[in-house]
Image (cartoon, rainbow, N blue to C red):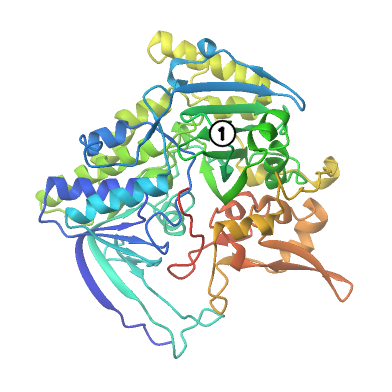
Amino acid sequence: MAEIEREAMEYDVVIVGAGPAGLSAAIRLKQLNADLDVVVLEKGSEVGAHILSGAVLDPVGLNKLIPDWKEKGAPLNVPVKEDNFYMLGEAGEVRIPNFVMPPLMNNHGNYIVSMGNVCRWMAEQAEELGVEIFPGMACSELVYGENGEVKGVVAGVFGLEADGTYGPNTEPGMELHGKYVFLSEGVRGSLSKEVITKYDLDANCDVPKFGVGMKEIWEIDPEKHNEGEVTHTMGWPLGTKNTGGTFIYHLDNNQVYVGMIVDLNYKNPYLFPYMEFQRFKHHPKVAELLKGGKRVAYGARAVTKGGYQSIPQAAFPGGALLGCSVGLVNLPRIKGNHNAMLSGIAAAEAAVEAIKAERQGDTLEAYNAELRSGPVGADLKKVRNVAPLNGRFGLLGGLTLGGFDMWFQTLTGGLSLFGTLKHGKNDAQSTESADKHKPIDYPKPDGTLSFDRLTNVSFAATNHEESQPCHLRLADPNLPIATNLPQFDEPAQRYCPAGVYEVVEKDGKPEFVVNFQNCVHCKTCDIKDPSQNITWVTPQGGDGPNYPNM
């Protein structure tokens, strides 16, 4: 095939992804040097369309970036006024007193927000400073320079044939070159995976760890609504062997966010994260809250939970990884947006200094150092053992030892009796064969509190142009039936929160079906598939979910 000819545009900094990290970087770049040419490329149909987060926002990053955010109308309208922690049993609950929780768990001063709306507002601030933002532009390839450095991206390829080749109606897109390229793609981004592998950025860190987060927005009876209330639960329905938890956040307009995170290190291939979430809503306490209300939106995404020891080198020749592309979520706080913003600020400051010194295409070592020694590193270091302790000792042991470790570090200024624990296996390797476990009998969704996957996916407003290549790539198309089905009862049928994968019978034989149109871009399959046979790559721009105010 002849080389594809593309138009190229030159910028000082090219940013992939209009999430909190990418937008913070863009804003900080222009604050420091208004003459810089900065572009942000977003694969969603609009800024915020692919943003899904809890979210209780710690405003520390926003305070640093835009100190007068309140005057500028940032959509942080619901301060947290009540903090609840419960351990659930099937029919009841035990409240964990706030005073036993480490101080870092306190949500005083934080805000219940839609991060989609926060990002929309941040995009407006960036554009006022002169940042160019192009939504609906998926970045499908990296462009490398003569010395092997990243020098840009290919964006805006549309109309590929189903087999991935260029046809008569294909738009080849364009190359956008930068002195530096920032990748803020969120969890498990395809370009981020490529640079981590190419430059061996994870050579000196622990394995990454993840959870799958599922969330619904409900409109509830005003009598039951308590604006500013934050509730977290553990225990039922996941039990004590599987780790994860749930959240219920009361925002404004009689709406609540209801969600569950299931850690993807679970062993039982019959576990069905989506159905665990649906079952949770039938707990008497939750069912009473939601009774008479209606679900208005649904979505899902993977969440990073490896923490401090899983952070790869964040700078590489020609660019940097930001936010969830590095993995900056504070697991016990269930917060990463503040660290995403701080990472974007730090990367921007390092790039401005480098450009001022007439450098380009090199490794921003100053950013790498700041990420570890600055406020992000400090935030993550003191909770670094929570995930490994959960993984080793399950819910109760992990909760007790993790809580002790956080308290001990709080009282001693950062000392830990555990040192820095390792995670062990990655999440794919954690999956055990089906013959070691029993199938789980999940109640059928009732259509009022709980819903089947395909009905719920319609509330994510996801859409993919059907004639394009499937963006969920199987290294071996035969492996799901030949290996995963007999060994693991093909867990893709269950771990995907959007019903993308099915095993159906055709001519008396099982067949693996990929309904890529359903995909909500959570990336769980890329992480949890026990054979690591599935690679998520970006579909064409504008496709995927269209979240309103997630």
Q: Residue 284, position in %: x, y?
A: 73, 29
Q: Nearer the viewer, residue 347 or 59?
A: 59
Rendered image quadrant of residue 259: top right
The residue shown at (44%, 16%) is 103
Rendered image quadrant of residue 271: top right
Q: Residue 165, position in %: x, y?
A: 50, 82
The residue shown at (20%, 42%) is 349
For this orientation, the residue located farthest to the bottom is 168
Q: Is residue 17 visible?
A: yes
Q: Which residue is mark 1?
A: 248
Q: Is residue 411 left or right of residue 528?
A: left
For this orientation, the residue located farthest to the right is 508
Q: Is residue 175 left or right of residue 497?
A: left
Q: Residue 351, position in %: x, y?
A: 20, 48
Q: Is residue 233 left or right of residue 65?
A: right
Q: Nearer the viewer, residue 509 or 90?
A: 90
The residue shown at (10%, 49%) is 356
Q: Is residue 201 visible?
A: no
Is residue 227 shown above or below 11?
Answer: above
